[in-house]
Amino acid sequence: MGEKRSTEAVLEATRDLDRRSTAEILAAVHAEDAKAVSAVSEVLPQLEKAVDILACTLGGGGRWFNVGAGTSGRMGALDSAELPPTFGIEPSRVQAVVAGGARALSRAVEGAEDDVYAGPCELRRRGLGVGDAVVAISASGHTPFVLSCLEEAYTAGARTIAITCDPASPLAEAAEIAIVTNTGAEVIAGSTRMKAGLAQKMVLHLLSTTVMVRLGYVRGNLMTHLMPSSEKLRERAIRILESTTDLNSEQATRLLDEYGGSVAAALASLERRSAG
C-alpha cells in the first residue's frame, strides 16, 4: 500500500453520485467547488510572501517559470501565456515548463509526469539560474516531474514556490514558500482537475495579477501596458487613452498609432509634454 494522499481520498458524501439526477450532480459539484474559495482564503499570507519573491525576481531582471504536469501544468502554461497580451511583459520573462512538452497542452502524454529527467534538462536548456524563480505546481505534491524541477531550482540557486493541495506532501515541505490549498477529497475520487484545479487556477491568477500591479503594469485598474493584438484589444486601448486623458476617440487613435499601439508609451509622451 502506498502512502495516504489527501487528493486521493474518497468523498463519502458522493458515493452514490452515479445514481443521482442531473440537478443533484450539478449541485454536488458546485457545493464542493465553493470549498476551493475558502481554501484559497486561508493561504493569503503565503501568497503575499510569494508575490514579494516574484516581484523582486522580475523587477531584478530575472524570470519566472511555472512547472507542472497534467492539469497543473496546463494551468501554469495558461497563466504564463496570458500575461504578455494583458500586461505587455515580454514572453521570455514568464515561462512554462510542462511535462510532455507542447503536446501535453491539448492531450495527455503517457508517463510524462513520472519523468524525472525531462524537467531539469529543459530548465538547464533555458539557462535557469540565480535571480530566477520556479513555481512548482502539483495538486498531490508528489509528482516526480515537478519534484525534480524543484531540485534543479535549488541546484541552480533559483527561488522556489510550491502550489499544492496536500500539506503533508514532499513538495509542500521542500519549497521555500508553500501555498497549500487543502481542498480535500474530490466529488469524483482523485480527479484533481476539479476543485483542486480550481484552487490552483485562483492561486495562479492571484499571484500573477498582484505581481503585475506591483511592478507598475497597471494604472488604477486599467491595462495600460496591454498589447493590442486584436480589434477588441485595440478598441480597449483607445478607450483607456480616452478615459485617462482629455483626448477624444480620433485623437486617441492617432496617438496610439504614432506609438505603435503602445498605450504606456502614448501616455508617457503626454506626460512629458505636460511636464515640458
Image (cartoon, rainbow, N blue to C red):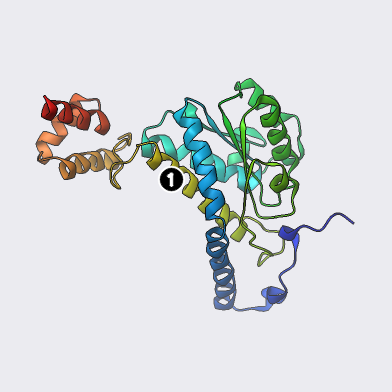
The quarter of the picture where the N terminus appears is bottom right
Residue 18 sits in quarter: bottom right
The picture places residue 63, in percent across and down from the top left corner, at 52, 29
Residue at point 66%, 55% (across, down): 165
Image coordinates for residue 151, horizontal then vertical, percent? 72, 33
Q: Nearer the viewer, residue 253 or 167?
A: 167
Q: Quadrant of residue 167?
A: bottom right
**57 above or below 182?**
above
Q: Is residue 16 left or right of residue 32?
A: right
Residue drawn at the location 73% of the way across and 60% of the way down? 6
Which quarter of the figure is the C terminus placed in? Answer: top left
Residue 101 is situated, as x and y percent measured from the top left of the image, at 63, 33
> Is 185 placed above or below 235 here?
below
Which residue type carries mark 1? Thr
Asked if residue 110 shows in the view, the reply is: no
| Residue 237 falls left or right of residue 113 | left
Please give the residue where the numbered disc 1 appears in the rendered image.
Answer: 210
Mark 1 burial class by Cα count in 10 Å: few <14, some 14-19, many 20+: some
Q: Label 1's element?
A: helix
Q: Residue furthest right?
A: 1
Above or below — where is 140 with respect to 258? Answer: below
Q: Is residue 82 visible?
A: yes
The front one of 30 and 90 is 90
Q: Along the line of sight, which residue is nearer the eye, 1 or 40?
A: 40
Residue at the spot x=49%, y=26% of the render?
92
Q: Is residue 250 left or right of residue 108?
A: left
Q: Position of residue 275 (x, y in %)?
A: 13, 28
**How many badges with numbers are in the image?**
1
